[in-house]
Image: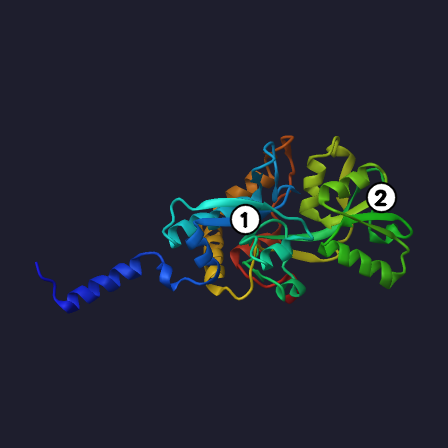
Amino acid sequence: MRIAPRALAVAVTAILMSTPVLAAELTGTLKKIKDSGTITLGHRDSSIPFSYYGDNARQPIGYSHDLQLKVVEALKQELNLPELKVRYNLVTSQTRIPLVQNGTVDLECGSTTNNVERQRQVDFSVGIFEVGTRLLTRVNSPIKDFDDLKGKNVVTTAGTTSERLIKAMNAEKKMDMNVISAKDHGESFLMLESNRAVAFMMDDALLAGEMAKAKKPADWHVTGTPQSFEIYGCMMRKNDPAFKQVVDKALTATFASGEVNALYDKWFMQPVPPKGLNLNFPMSDELKQLIANPTDKAAEEH
């Protein structure tokens, strides 16, 4: 049967509109992923319960990691790559931005704060979490708030917003604190646990995660007036709007469908690996607002 040219053109247009983006049209990260058949995901090893190693030291797990896998599923559809391979690349607070910038990592979803300073270096997805920066101390400690830290040893994790904030506070208020910058959250907690520091400053949800893996979780509590509110986002290379659109669409779809509530419950209100302890960290009003009204703005821009 011979098809009229106009009918053929209409049919071809319909097919193109219904299929994933053609390889010839791809640029940037989408082209890199399509050509290689692989996406490289950046992850953390001790950011409980966002992105960390559970019982398997080669397979990351966590709330942010589950959201990252939603993006992978969206890319399989978008690029018509049902067999898309996932490669994992461990990052730290200090290496995560350079590894995204230089192309080693395509997407990093962990516990990375979206702030104006970092926006000059990378792009962020819509926010996936909101936290306050507070203190972890022993329940019987006299340290209840930041003013109690004068002349004391305080630990935080290198390369984080908390490190910048506590150092600025120390200088501005002349508090004579000894600020210790540990390499990761696990080492920060070890400094606290071994009494080399009286308090650990970090995002409250991460502090709850450190409590959950402590030998005696009941010995610890999160305290202090939040010094900032932080919005976590997934990082990707700058000026790649096509890739960012796929990432944001996958995340907002997870929010809109309500799937995010099940993910939150799984990681913050139920026992989590490696010790099967429950963080008992209910969803904040701020996070509920962020999920209802997704934005890629930093908290300081609101």
Pick the front one: 95 or 286: 95
**Circle 2 is placed at which residue position?**
197
Pick the front one: 222 or 50: 50
In this rendering, position of residue 128 left or right of residue 230: left
How packed is label 1: few (under 14 Cα within 10 Å), some, or many (20 or more)? many
Q: Spatial distance from mark 2 to mark 1, Cα to Cα?
A: 33 Å
Of the image marks 2 and 1, the number of the one nearer the N terminus: 1
At x 75% / y 31%, what residue is drawn? Answer: 216
At x 16% / y 65%, what residue is drawn? Answer: 7
On the image, the x and y values in percent for residue 220 come to 77, 38
Pick the front one: 67 or 16: 16
For residue 278, what is the image quadrant? top right
- The type of residue carrying mark 1 is Leu
Quarter of the picture containing the C terminus is bottom right
Pick the front one: 32 or 168: 32
How packed is label 2: few (under 14 Cα within 10 Å), some, or many (20 or more)? many
Count of numbered circles on the image = 2
In this rendering, position of residue 212 left or right of residue 61: right
**Residue 41: mark:** 1
| Label 2 secondary element | loop
Q: Is residue 258 visible?
A: no
On the image, the x and y values in percent for residue 115 come to 65, 62
In this rendering, position of residue 144 left or right of residue 97: right
